Image (cartoon, rainbow, N blue to C red):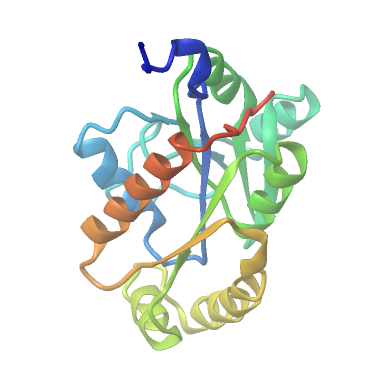
Amino acid sequence: MNHELTASARPETKPLLIVLSGPSGVGKDAVLKKMKELGHSFCFVVTVTTRPERAGEEDGVDYHFLSREEFQQMIQEGQLLEWANVYDNYYGVPKAKVAQALSEGKDVIVKVDVQGAATIKEILPQAVLIFLMPPSMDELERRLKGRDSGRYEDVALRLQKAKEEIERLSLFDYAITSHQDGIDNVISRIEAIVAAEKCRVKPRVVQL
C-alpha cells in the first residue's frame, strides 16, 4: 500500500509579509543591510521618507528620500500601504511593491515603526510582526548617543518613545533581543521564525 502523501494533502506554502519593527536605534537598518549582503531571497521593500539623508546612506537602497510635496502626493494617490509622521519626518511603505512581490509568490519584509506596524496589522492581519528589542534602555541610550544626530534632546525624546513602544509588545507575534554585535543572532532568529511559519498547517494568507 502506498502511504505517501499526495501534493494536495500537504498544506500549500504562501508568501509571507514580515514586518520588522522596534524603537529608534535598536538596529533594524543594520539587520536588513546584513540580510541583503547575505543574499536572502526576501523582497526588501524600501521605505519612503522625508527625513534628511544621513552619512553613508544611499537613495533607493536605505530609503527613497522625498520632498514633503512628493510624499503628500503619494498619500493623496493612495500609493502607500501605511504612513506616519515620526519625529517631524514622514515615513511610508509603497503599496505597489508589496502587492507585486506577494502576487509573484515572494516573501516580503518591510521595516516600520510601531505605529506603522499597528496600521499594517489592522489592514493585513495575516502579516507576521516581529519586534526588535534593545537588551536594555542603557544600551539603547548608548546607541542613540553614538549617532551623528545624537543631541541630548533628541536622545531623551527617543528613549521616552521607546518605553511607550515596548509597552505595545503584545501587538506583535514575535520578539527578538538585539544584543551588541549580535546581528547574526537576530538574523538566525528571523530565519527560524520564517521556517516555522512555512510549516503552519493553516498558512497565513496575505490578501492585498
How many marks overall?
0
Q: Is residue 75 above or below residue 33?
A: above
Tell me what residue is drawn at x 42 percent, y 74 percent.
Answer: 134
Q: Is residue 30 visible?
A: no
Q: Residue at x 71, y 41 (%)?
A: 125
Q: Say above or below: 203 vs 184.
A: above
> In the figure, is residue 29 to the left or right of 109?
left
Foreground pick, 160 / 167: 167
Q: Looking at this view, name the residue that lies furthest to the front.
A: 1
Residue at point 33%, 45% (across, down): 191
Residue found 63% across the figure and 26% down from its top: 95
Residue closer to the observer: 165 or 86? 165
Q: Quadrant of the N terminus?
A: top left
Q: Position of residue 173 (x, y in %)?
A: 57, 56
**Residue 194 left/right relative to 93:** left
Quadrant for the C terminus in the image: top right
